[in-house]
Image (spheres, helix red, strand yellow):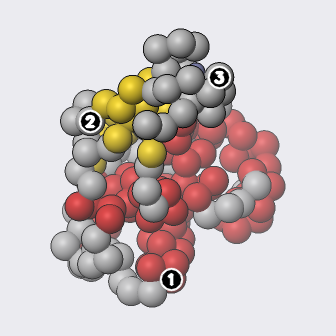
Amino acid sequence: MEKCYSCGNSIKTIKDKPYKFDECGINVVLYGITQYTCPTCNESYASIPNLPKLHRIIGTHICTKRKALLQPEEIKFLRKDLHLKAKELALTLGVTASTVSRWENGKKEIGEAHDRLLRSIYMMYASEQAHHIICEGILELFKQLPAKRKKIKQSTEISLNPQEWLNENLTTY
Ligand SMILES: [Zn+2]
C-alpha cells in the first residue's frame, strides 16, 4: 500500500479515470493515467510518465493541428517547452519582449508571420530533441493553413492516450 506524501496515511489508487493535465496551461485530458487520492487529507496526485515527451506531443499537436492563430496559452506553452524566457523568445523572433508579453496576455494577436515562424522553430526543436523528424509534410501543413485564421473556431481540448506519448516511434504523429 502506498502512502500519502503529505500526511503519510494510506492512499487510494484510481485507474481508468481521465486526468485533466491542467498544470501545463493547456486543456489536455490524459487517459490511462494512474491517480491517487488520500481519504485523510484529500490530497490527490497522478503519476505521469515521460513528461518531456508528453510536452513535445502537446506542442507538436498545437503546431500541426491547430489551424487558428496561436492563442496566448499556446504561445506560452511553446515558449516554455523551448526553455526560453520571454526576452529570449523575443530575440529569437526579432520582436521586443513587451510584444511577447502582449501575445501571452492576450492584448495583441501574434499575426501570420510570427505564428508561422514560431511553429517552425518549435517543430525543428522538437525534431532535434527526438532525434528524428517529428513533422512530415511540413510544406503541405503550411500551405494548408487557411488565409482567414481570425475567424476559425476550434476545440481547445487535446485528448491523449498513453500509446501516443509512451511509444518510441512517433512518426505516425
Ligand atoms: Zn494525506
Q: Kindly identify the residue that appears in the image at 63 percent across and 38 percent down.
A: 104
Mark number displayed over residue 15: 2
Q: Nearer the viewer, residue 136 or 13?
A: 13
The residues bearing labels 3 and 1 have C-alpha atoms spaced at a distance of: 42 Å
Q: Kindly identify the residue that appears in the image at 31 percent across and 30 percent down.
A: 14
Horizontal and vertical percent position of residue 169: 27, 78
- Can residue 20 be seen? no
Q: Earlier along the polypeptide chain: callout 2 or callout 1? A: 2
Horizontal and vertical percent position of residue 26: 45, 38
What residue is disc 3 on? 7
| In this view, 145 is above or below 1 | below
Q: Which of 122 and 163 is in front in this view?
A: 163
Query: Which image quadrant: the N terminus?
Result: top left
Horizontal and vertical percent position of residue 86: 75, 51
SS for dot 1:
helix
What residue is disc 1 on? 128
Query: Which image quadrant: the C terminus?
Result: bottom left
